[in-house]
Amino acid sequence: MEEEKRNKDNSFSKVVGDKEKRKLKAQGENKSVWSGLGLFGMVGWSIAVPTLLGAALGIWLDKHYKESFSWTLSLLVAGLMLGCVLAWNWVQKENKEIHKNNEDGME
């Protein structure tokens, strides 16, 4: 009976200690509104840059190599798709990192 009580006390202490470590770690990380806006900006630029580069290359190709289709529209869409894939991969990587940090804090 006494040993069971000690185990409960130890497990309770461990849970409280783990929560305290996570809270202190979260307080140590300086997450502000600006860092959140920075993340939005990063995703936005990772989509905008390939889209604009595709459009610029398309305009140049339209001037120099006439075709029955629009290089500008084709490469604009290709750049947009590439940018979305890049942004998706970046967000997934960040999500895994956040979940990994949360799991490490729980152990």
Image (cartoon, rainbow, N blue to C red):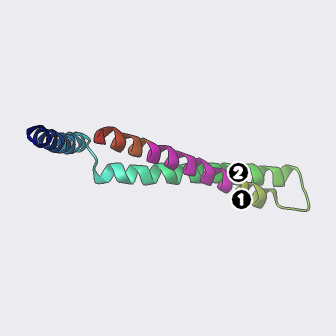
Q: Which residues are magenta?
A: 80-96
Left/right placement of residue 70 relative to residue 15 reads right
- In the rendered image, the quadrant that contains the N terminus is top left
**Residue on which disc 1 sits:** 77
Left/right placement of residue 43 relative to residue 33 reads right
Residue at left offset 11%, top offset 38%? 6
CA separation, marks 2 and 1?
Answer: 8 Å
**Residue on which disc 2 sits:** 54
Left/right placement of residue 12 relative to residue 41 reads left
| Amino acid bearing label 2 | Gly
Spot occupied by residue 31 in the image (x, y as percentages of width and height): 28, 47
2 and 1 marks in contact (CB < 8 Å): yes
Residue 89 located within the stretch drawn in magenta = yes
Residue at left offset 88%, top offset 51%? 65
| Amino acid bearing label 1 | Val
Spot occupied by residue 96 in the image (x, y as percentages of width and height): 46, 44
Density class for disc 1 (Cα within 10 Å; few <14, some 14-19, many ≥20) is some
In terms of secondary structure, what is the magenta stretch mainly? helix
